[in-house]
Image (cartoon, rainbow, N blue to C red):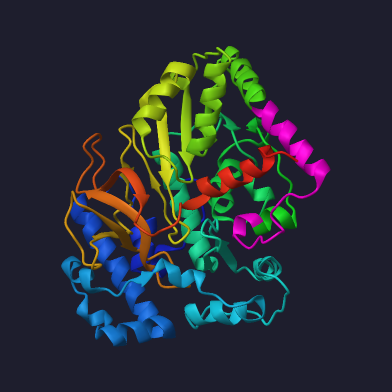
Amino acid sequence: MSGEQVPPRDSWDPIDEALYGPEDLYKVKAEEADRLRLGAVRSSLNRHYTRNRFYNTLCKQRGVTPEDFKKLDDLAKVPLVADAIFKQYPEPGKFVAWLRGISCDDVKYPKIEGSSYQELIDRLNEYGLKVIFSSGTSGRSSFFPRDQIALEREKHFRLHHYRFLGHDPEEYVVQLGPDYRKIHPNWVIAHTAGNDDRRFHKEDRIHHMVSIDATTDTVHTVMGQSGQMGRFQAKDKLKLLKEQAREANSLTAQILEDLNKKGAKGKIGGTPPLLNDFLSWMENSGERLSLGDRWIIETGGGGLVSPETLYNRVERVLGIPSENCRDIYGLSESTVSFPSCEGHYYHIVHTLLHPFVLDDELEPVGYGEFGRFGFIDPLAHAYPGCIITGDRIKLLESCPSCDRPGPVISSPITRAPGAEDRGCGATVRKLMAEVTDGA
């Protein structure tokens, strides 16, 4: 892909080959993808076995070594780490030591101090270590360190992700929510979707419909560390945010109408609940638009249980065809995300990520069965990317809708029993509830 710095081919390891080698990560034939993925996974497992004390101990407890994984079927025995482990961090005074303990020994952490997680994360950013945090929907965030190698690899993956979704760099962007980067750049939705908007689109063509200031209050809220700090207690701030929320739907409709008159292409982005709220406002106001196939709906952050219902409303109210409605399934645990195709199936980048569906005993089951989602993500360079998530999915061997090769995840994606409401969509709902509650 033009304009991107790719490491010289003679420096590639098997992970680089699986990432940088294919012209299009989503069009690699199954046999070649299997070869690339096995090489990448084995390289990653060897790295974490030899350089990560935490993962080395886990492998020895399970009685396995990297030499046990010679073919894809062997990967069912790879030790996976429960995502809850990334919530089990100590107070800020010991936080950097905890990060060091889950990281490989060649990821060097500076000697820094701070009185809060936010302060420590900001300091680590200055050293080129970006600690991504989840939305804290359980009342406690997860933290995942990314070193420069992981960040560069992730950046390249997102080019393929962008192209999969059919975006045009000349298109306009209408975001139904705030600019999440202004809350904190390490929040996973800011790190991914927020950065993508600025990276792939012109600044003067991006519109955010809600403004939320980057304050300690909001950062603590999205980190799930709020206590009394996430309450937006200042009366003047509450009143301002309430006014912005009430005006946002009207402003969104006006901007879309103006862009439609210009014949512009565009993307409407936001979480499914925000999109649902905007559609309800349009219906209640008797408004309709005919944006057509020049526009794309792009949702993400969780909360999309019934895409058919939502997308039928989009077609009826906004005039955007259902096949132009795309959802992104993303996890803070993974460096890659899963974009949906025109038929609303979530595609797995199968040169890299090795997926599992696990039963109640955490044993792998076959295609077409529901279970807990697990995966091996070789791009996780600092920490072991062998993760069991709290999400319940169904994996299909191929897409029933399009001809892109590789496995897909079908809707709905839900939380496994006992897991909290997931992701950024839940936190955005919390933030917007704070905005619209009475002062």
Work out whether residue 44 or residue 430 is closer to the camera in this orientation and state it.
Answer: 430
Vertical position of residue 385 compared to residue 397: above or below: below
Q: Quadrant of the C terminus?
A: top right
Q: Is residue 27 visible?
A: no
Query: Picture coordinates of residue 80 (x, y %)?
Result: 32, 71
Chief secondary structure of the magenta portion: helix
Tell me if 344 is positioned left or right of 116 in this view.
Answer: left
Q: State how many labels appear.
A: 0
Work out whether residue 21 or residue 308 is closer to the camera in this orientation and state it.
Answer: 308
Tell me the quarter of the picture where residue 359 sits: bottom left
Query: Picture coordinates of residue 380 (x, y %)?
Result: 43, 67
Query: Picture coordinates of residue 120 (x, y %)?
Result: 68, 71
Magenta region includes residue 225: yes
**Which residue sits at x=55%, y=15%?**
263
Work out whether residue 243 or residue 109 is closer to the camera in this orientation and state it.
Answer: 243
Q: Is residue 369 visible?
A: yes
Tell me if 217 is positioned left or right of 52 in this view.
Answer: right
- Most extreme residue toward the front, as rendered? 438
- Most extreme residue toward the right, as rendered? 236
Tell me the quarter of the picture where residue 65 sits: bottom left
**Which residue sits at x=18%, y=60%?**
365
User: Which contiguous range is marked in magenta?
Assistant: 221-248
**Which residue sits at x=23%, y=45%?**
405
Tell me if 322 is positioned left or right of 297 in this view.
Answer: left
Vertical position of residue 273 compared to residue 262: above or below: below
Tell me the quarter of the picture where residue 259 sits: top right
Tell me if 326 is positioned left or right of 275 in this view.
Answer: left
Query: Picture coordinates of residue 288 (x, y %)?
Result: 52, 13
Magenta region includes residue 234: yes
Vertical position of residue 241 compared to residue 224: above or below: above
